[in-house]
Image (cartoon, helix red, strand yellow):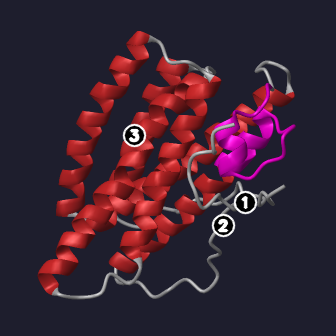
């Protein structure tokens, strides 16, 4: 069984300036909408939110790629990191589709929210990549909180701790008897890693010196091939 890292739940970047406050305010507004619409239906909540969460990495990688081509410079590993983040978030979506089948209305919401968020985030990244990465960092802080709440629901028996989907067992290299709780732990660890990486990118773009005290949450081990082989 792959090792699932523990997560520091106390991590929060204190906003320092207008850029940070805009990112935090936008995050809190979206969190309010998610809480209002989904309440404690965490499986359905994850389906919609992971669709959105897979957008920033792809947008950031695309714009960074084009910028590096124009400037004929190295990307310092950013493109690969952002592409992997986008793929990882997509795997979260593919997992939770197996846990909670989305309704027709939720599929419509996914399409509408994805287009609106993609266009908005693309514009934000063009104007202020720093704010965009800080926004993602705050998104991931909220994701860690949401998945922690999901774990509490499972532990209290209010959400069914069913068998882990086959795609999740393969991707996170979980044992055959893994349960949903194991999957949520792995997803939360992924989100904690993305949280710290994006806050670090925002700090770098702000021209601040590296925070030597900052620790990037450990990334869980993932399968090299995304989809499980056919039985």
Residue 153 is left or right of residue 216, and the answer is right
Q: Secondary structure at mark 3?
A: helix
Residue 8 numbered tag: 1
Q: Which residue is mark 3?
A: 52
Q: Is residue 33 visible?
A: yes
Q: Secondary structure at mark 1?
A: loop
Q: Which residue is mark 2?
A: 217
Quadrant containing the N terminus in the rendered view: bottom right
Q: Nearer the viewer, mark 1 or mark 2?
A: 2
Q: Is residue 202 visible?
A: no
Between residues 163 and 185, which one lies in front from this camera angle?
Answer: 163
CA separation in Å, label 2 and label 3 = 22 Å
| Labels 1 & 3 near each other (Cβ < 8 A) | no
Residue 122 is left or right of residue 225, and the answer is left
In the rendered image, residue 15 lying in the magenta stretch gets the answer: no
Position in image of residue 23 (x %, y %): 37, 53
The number of numbered badges drawn on the structure is: 3
- Disc nearer the start of the sequence (1/2): 1
Which span is picked out in magenta?
A: 162-187
Q: Give above or below for 159 relative to 179.
A: above
In the rendered image, residue 182 lying in the magenta stretch gets the answer: yes
Q: Looking at this view, name the residue that lies furthest to the left.
A: 70
Between residues 157 and 110, which one lies in front from this camera angle?
Answer: 110
């Amino acid at each position: 069984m792959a090792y699932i890292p523990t997560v520091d739940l106390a991590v929060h970047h204190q906003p320092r300036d207008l850029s940070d406050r805009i990112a935090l305010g936008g995050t809190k507004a979206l969190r309010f909408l998610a809480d209002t619409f989904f309440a404690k239906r965490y499986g359905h909540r994850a389906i919609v939110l992971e669709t959105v969460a897979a957008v920033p990495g792809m947008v950031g990688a695309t714009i960074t790629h084009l910028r590096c081509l124009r400037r004929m410079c190295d990307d310092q590993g950013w493109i690969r990191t952002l592409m992997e983040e986008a793929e990882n978030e997509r795997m979260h979506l593919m997992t939770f589709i197996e846990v909670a089948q989305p309704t027709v209305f939720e599929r419509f919401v996914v399409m509408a929210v994805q287009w609106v968020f993609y266009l908005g985030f693309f514009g934000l990244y063009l104007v202020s990549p720093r704010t965009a990465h800080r926004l993602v960092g705050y998104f991931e802080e909220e994701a860690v909180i949401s998945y922690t709440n999901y774990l509490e629901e499972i532990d209290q028996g209010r959400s069914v701790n069913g068998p882990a989907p086959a795609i999740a067992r393969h991707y996170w290299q979980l044992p055959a008897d893994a349960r949903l709780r194991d999957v949520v732990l792995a997803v939360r660890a992924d989100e904690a890693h993305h949280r710290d990486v994006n806050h670090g990118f925002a700090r770098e773009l702000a021209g601040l010196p590296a925070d030597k005290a900052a620790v990037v949450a450990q990334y869980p081990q993932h399968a090299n091939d995304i989809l499980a082989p056919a039985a």
